[in-house]
Image (cartoon, grey):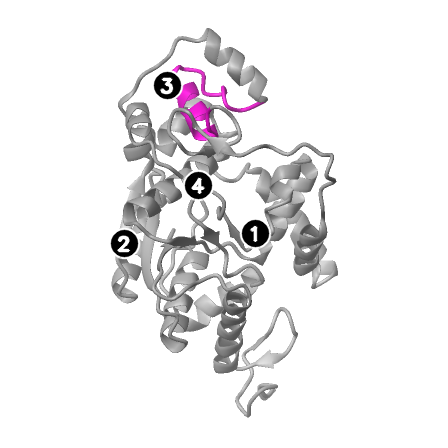
Amino acid sequence: MPAKPCQLCPGKAVLKGPKTGHRLCKECFFRAFEDEVHRTIIDNAIFKRGEVVAIGASGGKDSTVLAYVLKVLNERYDYGLKLVLLSIDEGITGYRDDSLETVKRNEKQYDMALKIVSYEELYGWTMDSIVRAVGLKNNCTFCGVFRRQALDRGALMLKVDKIVTGHNADDIAETVLMNVLRGDIARLARCTAISTGTDGALPRLKPFKYTYEKEIVMYAYFKKLDYFSTECIYSPNAYRGYARAFLKDLEAVRATSIIDVIHSGECMGVRKEVKMPTQGTCKQCGYISSQELCKACVLLEGLNRGLPRLGIGKSSRVKKALAEAPAASTPAAARLAAAKIDF
């Protein structure tokens, strides 16, 4: 059977667009993908000429495609940005060390400077050692908290103006579902925002907010981009996995489910009488926090005191445990305290 024609040009179609269902050739798909990301950037005015922007690079498909597309758009539309790569080495043997080799190749392929910041350097712990202490049930909590702060600290080392991450529409829809299921009103109120951190830490942007994961996979495949495709060895039991499976089931029934969930999250409001957390700064490291100690410092205290589950639970229990357990002083904790930064 002869190949069907592209619906936008005389060429031969090689795929069907996940959003529109249009049959597209490779070149039309590339242009449609890039144009959508460009519209997202322009409509939300997320960049200003002359800014230095750090791309959170893991070596995976999302961050690799993001780095490539931002380079293309920056040159095509003359954004006037200086783009750099920022990677976090969590210390996961057989996973992160391999993916960082991909990022190092991307550094040369895209002609971008690269900065790598490690958990061991910042916290004195690797994820391998954390998993040995806490097991596989709550390890993603440690990694997520430490990674967010490590990205900000790495960006400040680079003196950048903004951070961009490869979070796509699927990721954001999953986060909406997770926050609804957990009843986390504070996070639900901001998880669909294309820009976060504008009121404290460095602004963090999501240019792929409306881009489906399927589109990113197809773009990386047809462009033959160099990326790392292995899943984290410690993530099989992550709570997000259940939200992802549920979302995929919804998408199989209704193709627009991902965008529908995001729009629902955007439209949710919080009543004025609902008490929301007040943002302050951690008294120990200076990072943004709604508590006396930020989550990273609490988790680190627990690890250093031999109480690895200390930060997993209510803040009142944490305060009681901190008061009762002997304080621990480590080089990493001292470095965080000494490197207090005004976020």
Which three-letter amino acid code belongs to the residue tagged 1?
Answer: Asp
The magenta segment is 293-313
What kind of element bears circle 2?
A: strand
Residue 148, numbered label: 4
User: In the image, which is nearer the foreground, mark 2 or mark 1?
Assistant: 2
Secondary structure at badge 3 equals helix
Q: Amino acid at mark 4?
A: Arg
Q: Could you classify mark 1 by the number of other residues whose Cα lies within 10 Å: few (under 14), some (14-19), or many (20 or more)?
A: many
Q: Are marks 2 and 1 in contact (CB under 8 Å)?
A: no
Q: Report the disc number at residue 114.
A: 2
Q: Is residue 65 above or below residue 222?
A: above
Reading the image, the residue beneath label 1 is: 171
Measured as percent of width and height from the top left, residue 225 is found at 38, 66
In terms of depth relative to the viewer, which is nearer, 214 or 165? 165
Residue pictured at 32% horizontal, 55% vertical: 85
Residue position marked by numbered label 3 in the rendering: 304
Quadrant including the C terminus: top left
Kind of residue at badge 3:
Asn
